[in-house]
Amino acid sequence: GAAFGPFLLAVISGSGNAAALAFNGAVTPHAADFGYGIMQLGSMAQLGAGIGRSMSPVAGAGIIIAGLAGINPMEMAKRNAVPCIIATVVIMLLLL
């Protein structure tokens, strides 16, 4: 789905904006070809990327917060994994 690709890119890169902008620049202009509106596809991509950033162990904000909490960023990512994946699936189901 349109939320899952940007979600994965954000988890890997640590940047939700880069993932959403890349997806929205390349895929969203062709939303009608997939049977969706531009707002539908773009919103889904932006939300998926934002949630993916929350789960990323390499996101700058996550590294800072993990340091303040005295934990490894990977532990934080593991703890956030299930809620973030569920939220992304819910977004895909609600917005499609």
Image (tube, rainbow, N blue to C red):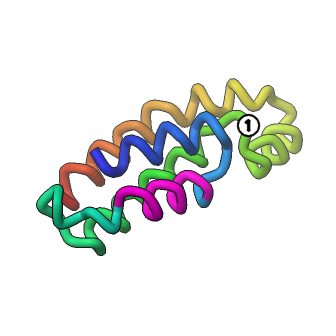
Q: Nearer the viewer, residue 19 or 56?
A: 19
**Magenta stretch in the rendered image:** 18-27
Q: Residues within 10 Å of mark 1 (few under 14, many from 20)?
A: some
Q: Residue 6: give x, y in percent of width and height.
A: 46, 47
Q: Nearer the viewer, residue 52 or 20?
A: 20
Q: Would you place residue 71 above or below residue 60 in this image?
A: above
Q: Quadrant of the C terminus?
A: bottom left
Q: Quadrant of the N terminus?
A: top left
Residue at 22% across, 61% down: 95
The amino acid on which the numbered mark 1 sits, given as a three-letter code, is Val
Q: Would you place residue 34 above or below residue 68 in this image?
A: below
Q: Residue 23: give x, y in percent of width and height.
A: 45, 55
Residue 86 visible in the current orientation:
yes
Residue 46 visible in the current orientation:
no
Q: Residue 85: give x, y in percent of width and height.
A: 40, 37
User: Total of numbered circles in the picture?
Assistant: 1
Say which element carries label 1.
loop
